[in-house]
């Protein structure tokens, strides 16, 4: 099986920075897309950023210019550097990855357990 383990959340003041990490482990043949979603209280989960194996990157408009996603393919790890944090960035952040476990198997979607990010004003 595959596991995604996140780390790096916490409490920070507005204007501060945090760096999230997510490491995939287990039966992994290849990883297509890795990314981050977030869910604030009372709201739906929304995409934040993702990065494809070929290097394409997408950001939701509200984080462009403040967040940077990157990945280390050798470590099966994706990072989210979050700068100039705002109170509205407060949410549980979830790692997501599209992973193929075997050469002939289809890609499957996997999720981490989530890490809390709280930005105080």
Image (spheres, rainbow, N blue to C red):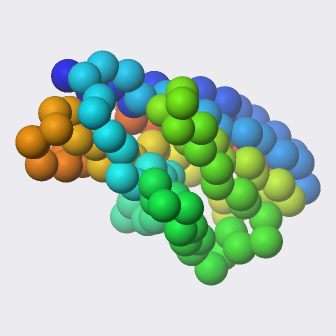
Most distant residue in the right direction: 15
Q: How many numbered marks have been drawn onto this rendered protein structure?
A: 0
Image point (46%, 54%), residue name: 53
Query: Closest to the observer: 30 or 34?
Result: 30
- Where's residue 99, x and y in %? 28, 42
Query: Closest to the observer: 23 or 72?
Result: 72
- Note whether 22 is above or below 84 in the view shown: above
- Where's residue 17, x and y in %? 84, 46
Most distant residue in the front direction: 103
Image point (16%, 33%), residue name: 102
Quadrant containing the C terminus is bottom right
Image point (20%, 33%), residue name: 101
- Note whether 23 is above or below 18 in the view shown: above
Quadrant containing the N terminus is top left
In the figure, residue 26 lies in which quadrant?
top left
- Note whether 8 is above or below 47 in the view shown: above
In the figure, residue 64 lies in which quadrant?
bottom right
Image point (56%, 67%), residue name: 57
- Where's residue 18, x and y in %? 77, 41
Taking the image as shown, residue 88 lies to the left or right of residue 113, namely right
Residue 40 visible in the picture: no
Taking the image as shown, residue 61 lies to the left or right of residue 104, namely right
- Note whether 25 is above or below 11 in the view shown: above
- Where's residue 13, x and y in %? 86, 46
Residue 95 visible in the picture: yes
Taking the image as shown, residue 58 lies to the left or right of residue 90, namely left
């Amino acid at each position: 099986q595959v596991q995604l383990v996140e780390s790096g959340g916490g409490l920070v003041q507005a204007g501060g920075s945090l760096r999230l990490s997510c490491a995939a482990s287990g039966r992994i043949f290849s990883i297509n897309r890795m990314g981050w979603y977030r869910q604030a209280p009372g709201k739906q989960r929304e995409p934040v950023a993702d990065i494809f194996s070929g290097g394409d990157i997408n950001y939701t408009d509200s984080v462009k210019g403040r967040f940077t996603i990157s990945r280390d393919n050798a470590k099966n790890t994706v990072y989210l550097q979050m700068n100039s944090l705002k109170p509205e960035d407060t949410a549980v952040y979830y790692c997501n990855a599209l992973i193929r476990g075997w050469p002939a198997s289809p890609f499957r979607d996997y999720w981490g357990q989530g890490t809390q990010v709280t930005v105080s004003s």
